[in-house]
Image: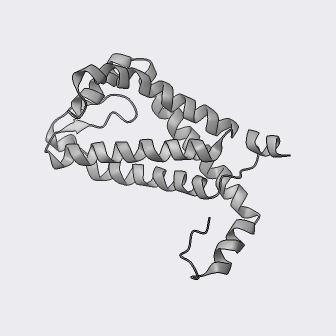
């Protein structure tokens, strides 16, 4: 999979894939994303009702889905963290991470566009807040940064000290 359009810098893409440092950059991206998912999941798992309240505050899902999503989200985040930490199925986990991050970015942008004043609940908490306490742009930029990490891992999933590396040898 060439990251550059056909015929544009064809050697650059090949050289990056062959560069031995790519696996180390991917390892840093994998572990960084694992920390993010672990932090987010652990912050929410202790109080699933609060996580459900954060989901409810977005006013996107029907009420029948608020609790299942709010209660399941911390477990999904912790599963992603664990899989990234051990390096098992890195590309697949990165794809799931990217989809989840896109959903989070869309949710935050939707709340911002509709004038809803909420704390995103990304790392615990969540729910209605005073309009002066919203930080939508920062949250979107932060999640976009995490999305870039996931994108890197989708493109370059080979990492050091991973179960994938061990299974491939």
Viewed as shown, does residue 126 lie left or right of 153?
left
- Spot occupied by residue 55 in the image (x, y as percentages of width and height): 29, 29
Residue occupying the point 25% across, 31% down:
61
Viewed as shown, does residue 130 lie left or right of 164?
left
Residue occupying the point 60% across, 58% down:
155
Q: Residue furthest right?
A: 169
- Spot occupied by residue 114 in the image (x, y as percentages of width and height): 14, 45
Quadrant hosting residue 161: top right
Residue occupying the point 44% across, 17% down:
46
Number of numbered discs: 0
> In which quadrant will I find the N terminus?
bottom right
Residue occupying the point 24% across, 27% down:
56
Query: Which of the two residues, 5 or 97, is positioned nearer the viewer here?
Result: 5
In the rendered view, would you say 110 is above or below 26?
above
Query: Which of the two residues, 63 or 25, is positioned nearer the viewer here?
Result: 63
- Spot occupied by residue 4 in the image (x, y as percentages of width and height): 56, 74
> In the rendered image, is residue 137 in sight?
yes
Viewed as shown, does residue 65 lie left or right of 34?
left
- Spot occupied by residue 122 in the image (x, y as percentages of width and height): 37, 36
């Amino acid at each position: 999979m060439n990251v550059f359009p056909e015929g544009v810098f064809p050697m650059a893409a090949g050289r990056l894939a062959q560069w031995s440092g790519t696996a180390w950059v991917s390892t840093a991206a994998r572990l960084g994303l694992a920390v993010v998912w672990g932090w987010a999941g652990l912050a929410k798992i202790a109080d699933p009702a609060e996580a459900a309240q954060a989901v409810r505050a977005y006013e996107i899902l029907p009420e029948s889905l608020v609790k299942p999503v709010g209660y399941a989200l911390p477990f999904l985040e912790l599963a992603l963290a664990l899989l990234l930490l051990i390096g098992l199925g890195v590309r697949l986990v990165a794809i799931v991470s990217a989809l989840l991050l896109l959903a989070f970015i869309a949710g935050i942008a939707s709340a911002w566009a509709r004038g809803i004043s909420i704390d995103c609940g990304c790392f615990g908490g969540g729910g209605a807040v005073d309009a002066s306490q919203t930080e939508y742009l920062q949250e979107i930029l932060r999640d976009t940064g995490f999305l870039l990490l996931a994108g890197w891992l989708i493109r370059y999933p080979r990492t050091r000290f991973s179960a994938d590396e061990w299974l491939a040898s």
